[in-house]
Amino acid sequence: MKKIGFDLWGTLVEANPLFKERKQDLFKKHFPYSPSVNFEGEMLSIKTDLNNIINDSGWQPSDELIINLIATRFGTSGDKATRFLLDYQRLAIVYAPLLILPTTKQILENLAKKDYELHIISNTMFIKGDALREHLHFLGIGQLFKSMRFSDSVKYAKPDIRIFSSQKLDYFVGDNAHVDGAYAKKIGARFIQINTNDKTIEDAYDIITKGQ
């Protein structure tokens, strides 16, 4: 039985457009005295800083570190940053991520029927893995994966192999050549890049099942 690992964000799911819209109201609610701040830009900058930490150490950044970075960037207290992050996570569940392609569920079901063993190996940042796991079941695909490994619960993050080192994977499907590609190389899996190039999960299915 061949084993396939999948990244999540940018590979199987993407942010809900309504979440992107509602985030602006959330920023205004929690940081009403910072109208000149580019909140989206600052959150992206925080994410970049956190990714640099991951790449340098392999460790998943702690909640405390994330909160401290938010508090510093937005000039607020740790308590206010904590409340903001909790609201951010709740909003992300209300306006939950969407499957990138409507055929994703069928493709995963077909792979499972062909006796491929499927796994999720995903880094998390502002949205917890437990919430993502629950939502994948809501989307009807959670039950198709033998395991789901999220960096916030494992405490290691890709490309560090300790995020999922118990089994060898034959393929790893992801959108990020730097992170997902490096992880695949480290574990000896064939990397299939999708969505950030000219390929989709449908192409990945053909590559895997037809041995292309």
Image (spheres, rainbow, N blue to C red):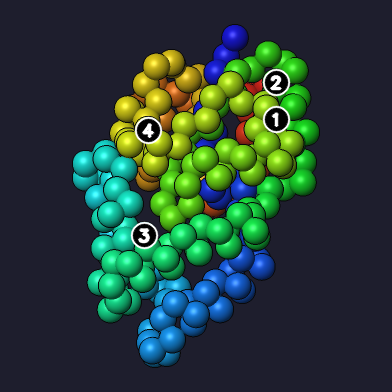
- Nearer to us of marks 4 and 3 is 4
Q: Is residue 178 left or right of residue 97?
A: left
Where is residue 144? Give x, y as percent: 67, 26
Mark 1 to mark 4 CA distance (whole Å): 24 Å
Tell me which label, 4 or 3, sits earlier in the chain.
Answer: 3
Q: Nearer the viewer, residue 205 or 80?
A: 80
Q: Sequence order check: which comes first, mark 1 or mark 3?
A: 3
| In the foreground, 203 or 212 | 203
Residue ranking furthest to the left = 56
Q: What residue is shown with label 4?
A: 154
Q: Are marks 2 and 1 in contact (CB under 8 Å)?
A: yes
205 vs 15, nearest the viewer: 15
- Residue 144 position (above or below residue 48): above
Q: Which mark is residue 28?
A: none
Q: Residues within 10 Å of mark 3 (few under 14, many from 20)?
A: some
Residues at circles 2 and 4 in contact by the CB criterion of under 8 Å = no
Q: Position of residue 118 (x, y in %)?
A: 59, 24
Residue 146, can we see it? yes
Give the spatial CA distance, label 1 vs label 3: 29 Å
Name the secondary structure under disc 2.
Answer: helix
Numbered tag placed on residue 112 in the rendering: 2
Q: Which residue is mark 3?
A: 47
Q: As shown in the figure, which amino acid type bears the numbered disc 3?
A: Lys
Percent x, y for residue 69?
Answer: 28, 64
- In 3D space, how far apart are the residues under numbered discs 2 and 1 (Cα atoms)? 6 Å
User: The residue tagged with tag 1: helix, strand or loop?
Assistant: helix
Marks 1 and 4 in Cβ contact (< 8 Å): no
Q: Which residue is mark 1?
A: 108
The image position of residue 173, as x and y in percent, is 54, 34
